[in-house]
């Protein structure tokens, strides 16, 4: 019996020591507001967990969107959302000294993450909340998808009891199995469980392309910028990694996902709400076109019933604006910013 307790004590000491080391030795994730765009694609969690009120004489816009507004987070891309913040502030729209545009857009975002963010924003009061979305964001493939399978760290927000209570029971039943909720709760509180993200960042920074080549699950960005880690080699793009064609899977279940999100979106205590159907280019012969049309019809009807303003920008640009039908060539980030500047000031008045 004594050996049992000694063994248990040793295990506790080992894990406690490892947790202490992880908390004190792993790099700190920088604040998003300090480093909003960078080539390592990390995000600072404080912007999400400690979003305080906007300073006096400041207006705040929260922009929820997908990879089009995420744009790889590279400064050279000059993302339209960043341009929008500078343009609105320069013109002192609404008489505000500064217009903050928080770009909460993510590569590979799904309806799960958009819905969680909408639930989280019930404790905030931005001047404007924008959902710039497309049909692929509400794919029916996500209808029974658990939160453990998404690519971002947004599910960490469900460790907040207020966010969990705000999410509808149907969402919790489909997407939040108990084991996944416990996993997010533990990861949010145990630094040792975040060592995986640190290890992948370290390896990929040392040998560029390793993360993509081995496809680290649920991790397509670097959580940390590791200044002291020198690059030894670049593995390039692995030969087995092929670009998948843009595909939409919008069906009957997608409408339920869309309604669920818009219910929470409409209830965000913001002064103004706006849904934008994001620009894209689809050939008339494209098999995705019928589903994209159905998505546009659904969102117009559902949003109208909830009193949400909708802008349909899908047909704004032709093929020349995109390198794959969805993501802008760099000059068109400015083109789209100019379009938004024509109408967005009236929404903020």
Image (cartoon, rainbow, N blue to C red):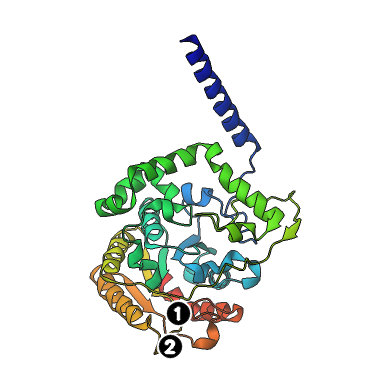
Q: Nearer the viewer, residue 268 or 236?
A: 236
Real-space Cα separation, disc 2 to disc 1, in angstroms: 14 Å
Tell me: residue 250, above or below residue 19.
Answer: below
Q: Nearer the viewer, residue 331 or 12?
A: 12
Tell me: residue 56, above or below residue 319.
Answer: above
Residue 200 coordinates in the image, percent (x, y):
61, 50
Label annotation for residue 279: 1
Label annotation for residue 41: none
For the view shown, which residue lies furthest in the left direction?
Answer: 305
Tell me: residue 337, above or below residue 260.
Answer: below
Residue 140 visible in the picture: yes
For the view shown, which residue lies furthest in the bottom direction?
Answer: 284
Per the image, label 2 sits on a secondary structure element best described as loop
The local crowd at label 2, few if under 14, some if 14 to 19, many if 20 or more residues have their Cα within 10 Å, is: few
Residue 169 coordinates in the image, percent (x, y):
25, 51
For the view shown, which residue lies furthest in the top direction?
Answer: 2
Q: Nearer the viewer, residue 10 or 123?
A: 10
300 with respect to 127 (left or right): left
Q: Which residue is mark 2?
A: 283
Residue 1 coordinates in the image, percent (x, y):
45, 10
Per the image, label 1 sits on a secondary structure element best described as loop
Residue shown at the point (75%, 48%) measured from the top left: 228
Looking at the rendered image, the quarter that the C terminus falls into is: bottom left
Residue 219 coordinates in the image, percent (x, y):
53, 55
């Amino acid at each position: 019996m004594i050996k049992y307790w000694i063994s248990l004590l040793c295990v506790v000491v080992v894990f406690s020591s490892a947790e202490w080391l992880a908390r004190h030795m792993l790099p700190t994730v920088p604040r998003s507001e300090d480093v909003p765009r960078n080539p390592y694609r990390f995000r600072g969690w404080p912007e999400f967990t400690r979003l305080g009120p906007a300073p006096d004489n400041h207006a705040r816009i929260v922009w929820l969107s997908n990879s089009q507004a995420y744009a790889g987070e590279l400064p050279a891309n000059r993302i339209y959302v960043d341009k929008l913040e500078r343009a609105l502030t320069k013109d002192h729209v609404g008489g505000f000294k500064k217009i903050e545009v928080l770009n909460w857009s993510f590569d590979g975002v799904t309806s799960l993450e958009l819905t969680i963010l909408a639930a989280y924003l019930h404790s905030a009061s931005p001047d404007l909340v924008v959902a710039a979305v497309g049909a692929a964001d509400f794919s029916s493939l996500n209808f029974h998808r658990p939160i453990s399978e998404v690519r971002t760290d947004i599910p960490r927000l469900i460790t907040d009891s207020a966010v969990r209570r705000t999410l509808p029971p149907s969402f919790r039943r489909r997407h939040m199995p108990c084991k996944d909720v416990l996993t997010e709760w533990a990861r949010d509180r145990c630094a040792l469980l975040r060592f995986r993200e640190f290890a992948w960042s370290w390896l990929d920074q040392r040998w560029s392309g390793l993360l993509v080549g081995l496809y680290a699950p649920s991790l397509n960005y670097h959580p940390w910028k590791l200044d002291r880690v020198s690059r030894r080699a670049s593995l390039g793009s692995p030969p087995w990694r092929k670009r998948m064609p843009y595909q939409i899977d919008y069906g009957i279940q997608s409408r339920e996902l869309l309604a669920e999100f818009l219910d929470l979106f409409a209830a965000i205590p913001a002064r103004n709400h706006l849904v934008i159907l994001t620009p894209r280019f689809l050939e008339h012969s494209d098999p995705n076109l019928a589903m994209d049309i159905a998505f546009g019809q659904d969102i117009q009807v559902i949003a109208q019933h909830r009193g949400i303003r909708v802008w349909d920008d899908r047909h704004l640009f032709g093929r020349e604006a995109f390198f794959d039908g969805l993501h802008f060539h760099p000059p068109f980030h400015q083109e789209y910013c100019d379009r938004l500047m024509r109408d967005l000031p009236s929404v903020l008045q």
